[in-house]
Image (tube, helix red, strand yellow):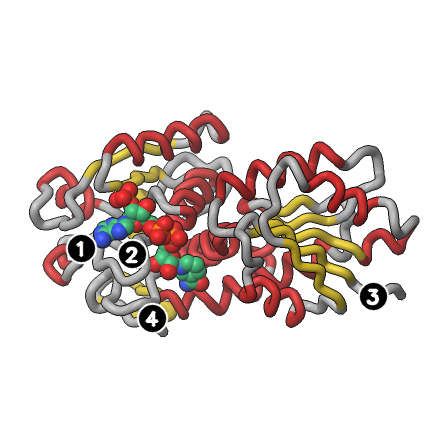
């Protein structure tokens, strides 16, 4: 059995050490780390993966695409996909900014308590605060794909509308809408009304940004699941603790960043394992959610 070689393609100048450590823990024997990867310079790196090992041995080479700029990583991913031909390809995992694995883990957590199944008519109403960041965008897309009626909230309506447009382009049947808010739910009547009716709230704001204070949280009387993905104090949702994992709180269960983070790590490692066993795997957020649901 040849050694498992993972080729880490990172769009940032410095390839992520987080992604490197997880790769080794997930079973990569050798890690080849490349920073500053762009669509223009990636083809020769991919050729090196494609043309060195033949037959079944090809499965022991795989590619991880990361970096803090999701759009840049997706452009690299498109070029990687276009470089493969026929069966001469290796498994690929796309997880820039940890957004795909984190979003998948958040949706796995929510689906433990809510009817979130592909193709179902919208049964759950979801609000994604900070829904314009890498993580929030993916959470919104995955929830929409699981039949939720999703509202993406941003402090700038145009940014939320852009996210809605991207989701709708990928999922034409999705029930997804945009909302503007001031950053405080109390002072925003339209959003306060929405929060009162919502089944699921996911706070995906920037690290250390408080999105929902205690009075805002109290409005969410109908909420069955509340998830705060921010691990950096203060909490994104007041009262949620990073370690919370399905902790009952009023009529809801709450999850904090570390409560979701355990599943995220399992999904990440399972994804790495998958790309070493399936040369035609090209794992994006939806594939990682499926992996998370099977864990
Ligand atoms: N648990 C895990 O395993 C894990 C893994 C990765 C990331 N995370 C966490 O997930 C969260 C989202 O990550 P990300 O990379 O998507 O975040 P991000 O891009 O830094 O921020 C997300 C959104 O937050 C909003 N925002 C920024 N500053 C704000 C403020 N002061 N008040 C209110 N809203 C503000 C912005 O939206 P608008 O400007 O459009 O309003 C921004 O698009 C972060 O807290 C991150 O630490 C957790």
Q: Quadrant of residue 242?
A: bottom left
State yes or no: Cβ of the residue under disc 4 lies below 8 Å from any atom of ligand 1. Answer: no
Examine the rendering and report whether any part of residue 112 can be seen: no
On residue 37, which mark appears? none
Disc 4 versus disc 2: nearer the observer: 4
Dot 4 corresponds to which residue? 242
- Position of 201 with respect to 288 (left or right) is left
Among numbered discs 2 and 3, the one appearing first in the sequence: 3
On residue 3, which mark appears? 3
Contact check, label 1 and label 4, Cβ < 8 Å: no
Separation of residues labelled 3 and 1 (CA atoms): 53 Å
Q: Residue at x 14, y 62 (%)?
A: 214
Separation of residues labelled 1 and 4 (CA atoms): 21 Å
Q: Check disc 4 and report its element: helix, strand or loop.
A: loop
Separation of residues labelled 2 and 1 (CA atoms): 9 Å
Dot 2 corresponds to which residue? 224
Among numbered discs 1 and 4, the one appearing first in the sequence: 1
- Position of 154 with respect to 72 (left or right) is left
Q: Check disc 3 and report its element: helix, strand or loop.
A: loop
- Position of 46 with respect to 272 (left or right) is right
Q: Residue at x 49, y 69 (%)?
A: 262
Count residues near mark 4 (Cα–Cα under 10 Å), then give few for <14, some for 14-19, many for 20+.
Answer: many
Q: Residue furthest right?
A: 55
- Position of 128 with respect to 83 (left or right) is left
Rendering coords of residue 37 (x, y %): 61, 46
Disc 1 versus disc 4: nearer the observer: 4
Disc 3 versus disc 1: nearer the observer: 3
Q: Residue at x 31, y 40 (%)?
A: 152
Dot 1 corresponds to which residue? 221
Disc 2 versus disc 3: nearer the observer: 3
Q: Check disc 2 and report its element: helix, strand or loop.
A: loop
């Amino acid at each position: 059995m040849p050694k498992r070689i993972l080729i880490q393609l990172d769009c940032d100048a410095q390839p992520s050490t987080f992604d490197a450590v997880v790769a080794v823990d997930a079973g990569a024997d050798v890690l080849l780390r490349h920073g500053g990867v762009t669509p223009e310079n990636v083809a020769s790196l991919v050729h090196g993966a494609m043309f060195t090992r033949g037959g079944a041995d090809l499965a022991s080479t795989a590619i991880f695409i990361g970096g803090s700029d999701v759009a840049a990583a997706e452009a690299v991913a498109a070029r990687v996909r276009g470089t493969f031909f026929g069966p001469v390809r290796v498994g690929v995992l796309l997880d820039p900014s940890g957004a795909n694995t984190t979003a998948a883990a958040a949706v796995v957590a929510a689906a433990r308590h809510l009817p979130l199944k592909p193709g179902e008519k919208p049964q759950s109403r979801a609000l994604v605060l900070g829904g314009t960041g890498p993580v929030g965008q993916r959470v919104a897309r995955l929830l929409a794909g699981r039949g939720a009626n999703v509202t993406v909230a941003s402090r700038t309506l145009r940014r939320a509308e852009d996210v809605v447009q991207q989701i709708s382009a990928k999922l034409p049947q999705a029930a997804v809408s945009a909302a503007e808010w001031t950053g405080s739910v109390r002072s925003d009547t339209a959003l306060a009304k929405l929060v009162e009716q919502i089944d699921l709230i996911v706070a995906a704001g920037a690290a250390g940004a408080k999105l929902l204070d205690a009075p805002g949280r109290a409005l969410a009387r109908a909420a069955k699941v509340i998830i705060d993905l921010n691990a950096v104090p203060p909490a994104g949702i007041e009262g949620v603790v990073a370690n919370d994992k399905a902790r009952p709180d009023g009529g809801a269960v709450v999850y904090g960043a570390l409560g979701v983070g355990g599943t995220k790590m399992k999904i990440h490692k399972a994804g790495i394992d998958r790309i070493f066993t399936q040369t035609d795997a090209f794992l994006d957020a939806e594939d990682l959610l499926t992996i998370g649901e099977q864990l």
